[in-house]
Image (spheres, rainbow, N blue to C red):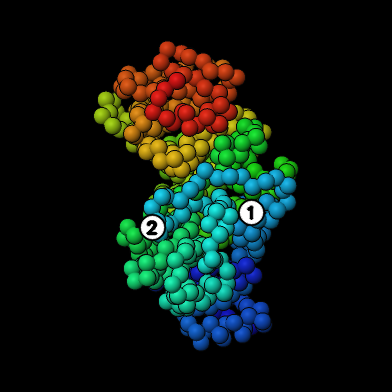
């Protein structure tokens, strides 16, 4: 048996559920394990790693019962999110979808960021077919390059002039120094994927100083899904590729629950982002009530029994890992007192629906309303990024709580959207848009709802949600209806 009583945090997990830990200098950001055990087979690996890099330790099978308070971190799965997505996609008989994502026309190196399971690796293998593909989720690649980052050059043939792909670059941030050197000295071109640019920046690593472009990949869009798009299914299960290609609702639910479990175990734990995974799991469930709402840090802190600063840090973790995004308040030439706090969304409606607790007092619209709003906004974000529409995204809310759900401001104009979970347009549904129009007369105004056809209410165009999602290119163009 191998024991360690050092203060350690997870450094990475491989496909065989092998945890590697390394000491962190900040004692306030580490967990302390008084007894950690490896299997007899692992003793050989321990000896090898201690000889190779004495500050590494190998530990197996921790976190067996972190807490019984929340289901999202018990029975942590052994599979990675990529393996889960591949497994569920293979069960489907449907064809793969053609993505609207594309590389910039410039031939520079590029970062592709996006949450796990959005299809980055699949897109690279089908669209780029790289001759050199380095997967840092692979134990062999990880151990070799983490021990000696400069050895990446040994993987590249002489006179090579094609793309070099590094998947999950955030697992070895130090590798970016070697990438930088090879771009400068050999003129190599790299495609690097990762789950967060903010996470890398917070580690103080080299992001290549403008020598690489940055793109983002989002969940599937309604346009990409084509004839397979179902509004009812999208509101319930979201647009993660695996969730869209699974045949049964039971399997979709199982996949999304596994996704949440795995994200917490593989991203939050292994990166040492928090010492208290039980508290974080309670927080993430409570945060689901804030999907589509202005964040009230103090209220959430009271609900989960944590300090406000801890809750603010937890929201930052979600955004760092691209599990969520926020919309700031639109303040251009403001004529009235406005809210100061941002609006919060999980990155995919299916993730929100999976995290959101349900009880006998919860109405359908109470849960599906924020889901519908989040679905429309995640589609707008994807189209805006993929087609370089140039919009900045906001929401608008006055001190008296008059609100517009989404404001787009950019080269194609000023557009305001109110999203309603209703089949008819009521007078009160138009209040926020009319108030916005009085402050910004040039704005184009849209109400997105569940009705069967377009309607026109003075300067406001009401559009059925399914039409808006499948014609979002027209909606985000410079012309109005």
Which quadrant holds the N terminus? bottom right
Across and down, in percent, residue 359 comes to 65, 36
Residue 85: image tag: 1
Q: Secondary structure at mark 2?
A: loop
Q: Is the residue 15 above or below the residue 117 in the image?
A: below
Across and down, in percent, residue 23 comes to 45, 74
| Residue designated by label 2 | 108
Which quadrant holds the C terminus? top left
**First reached walking from the N terminus: tag 1 or tag 2:** 1
Name of the residue lying farthest toward the top: 458
Q: Is the residue 236 above or below the residue 133 in the image?
A: above
Query: CA–CA distance between discs 1 and 2?
Result: 30 Å
Across and down, in percent, residue 100 comes to 52, 43
Across and down, in percent, residue 457 comes to 46, 13
Q: Nearer the viewer, residue 113 or 101?
A: 101
Q: Quadrant of residue 19?
A: bottom right
Q: Nearer the viewer, residue 432 or 178?
A: 178
Q: Quadrant of residue 199?
A: bottom left
Q: Is the residue 78 above or below the residue 307 in the image?
A: below
Pointers 1 and 2 in contact (CB under 8 A)? no
Residue 121: image tag: none
Q: Quadrant of residue 244?
A: top right
Q: Can residue 7 be seen?
A: no
Residue shown at 46%/28% (left/top)? 475
Q: Can residue 480 be seen?
A: yes
Near mark 2 (Cα within 10 A), the count class, few <14, some 14-19 or many ≥20, is some
Residue shown at 52%/22% (left/top)? 463
Image depth: mark 1 or mark 2 in front: 2
Name of the residue lying farthest toward the front: 159
Q: Secondary structure at mark 1?
A: helix
Task: Answer with left or right where residue 235 lies relative to residue 316.
Answer: right
Residue shown at 46%/19% (left/top)? 461
């Amino acid at each position: 048996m191998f024991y360690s009583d050092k203060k350690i945090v997870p450094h990475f997990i491989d496909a065989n559920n092998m945890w590697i830990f390394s000491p962190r200098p900040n004692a306030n950001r580490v967990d302390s394990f008084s007894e950690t055990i490896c299997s007899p087979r692992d003793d050989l690996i321990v000896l090898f790693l201690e000889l190779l890099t004495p500050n590494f330790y190998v530990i197996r099978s921790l976190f067996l019962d972190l807490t019984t308070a929340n289901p999202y971190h018990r029975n942590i799965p052994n599979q990675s999110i990529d393996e889960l997505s591949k497994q569920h996609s293979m069960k489907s008989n449907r064809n793969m979808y053609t993505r609207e994502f594309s590389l910039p026309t410039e031939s520079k190196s590029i970062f592709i960021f996006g949450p796990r399971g959005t299809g980055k690796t699949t897109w690279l293998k089908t669209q780029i077919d790289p001759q050199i593909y380095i997967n840092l989720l692979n134990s062999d690649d990880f151990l070799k390059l983490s021990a000696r980052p400069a050895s990446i050059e040994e993987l590249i043939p002489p006179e090579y002039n094609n793309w070099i792909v590094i998947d999950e670059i955030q697992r070895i941030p130090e590798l970016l120094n070697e990438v930088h050197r090879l771009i400068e000295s050999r003129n190599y071109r790299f495609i690097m994927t990762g789950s967060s640019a903010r996470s890398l920046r917070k580690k103080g690593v080299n992001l290549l100083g403008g020598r690489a472009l940055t793109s983002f990949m989002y969940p599937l869009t309604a346009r990409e899904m084509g004839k397979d798009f179902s509004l009812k299914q999208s509101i319930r299960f979201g647009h993660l590729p695996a969730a869209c290609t699974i045949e049964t609702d039971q399997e979709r639910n199982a996949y999304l629950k596994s996704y949440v479990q795995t994200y917490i175990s593989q991203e939050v734990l292994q990166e040492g982002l928090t010492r208290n995974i039980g508290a974080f799991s309670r927080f993430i469930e409570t945060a689901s009530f804030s999907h589509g709402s202005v964040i009230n840090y103090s209220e959430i802190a009271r609900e989960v029994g944590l300090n406000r600063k801890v809750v603010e840090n937890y929201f930052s973790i979600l955004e760092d890992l691209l599990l969520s995004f926020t919309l700031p308040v639109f303040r251009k030439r403001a004529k009235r007192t406005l809210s100061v706090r941002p609006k919060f969304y999980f990155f995919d409606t299916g993730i929100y629906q999976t995290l959101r607790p349900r009880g006998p007092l919860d109405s359908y619209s109470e849960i599906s309303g924020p889901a519908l709003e989040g679905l429309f906004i995640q589609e707008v974000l994807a189209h805006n990024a993929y087609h370089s529409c140039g919009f900045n995204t906001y929401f608008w809310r006055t001190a008296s709580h008059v609100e517009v759900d989404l404001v787009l401001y950019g080269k194609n104009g000023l557009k305001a959207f109110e999203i309603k979970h209703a089949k008819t347009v009521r007078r009160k549904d138009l209040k926020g848009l009319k108030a916005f129009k009085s402050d910004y007369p040039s704005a184009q105004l849209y109400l997105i709802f569940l009705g069967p056809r377009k309607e026109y209410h003075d300067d406001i165009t009401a559009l059925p949600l399914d039409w808006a999602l499948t014609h979002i290119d027209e909606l985000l163009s410079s012309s109005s209806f």
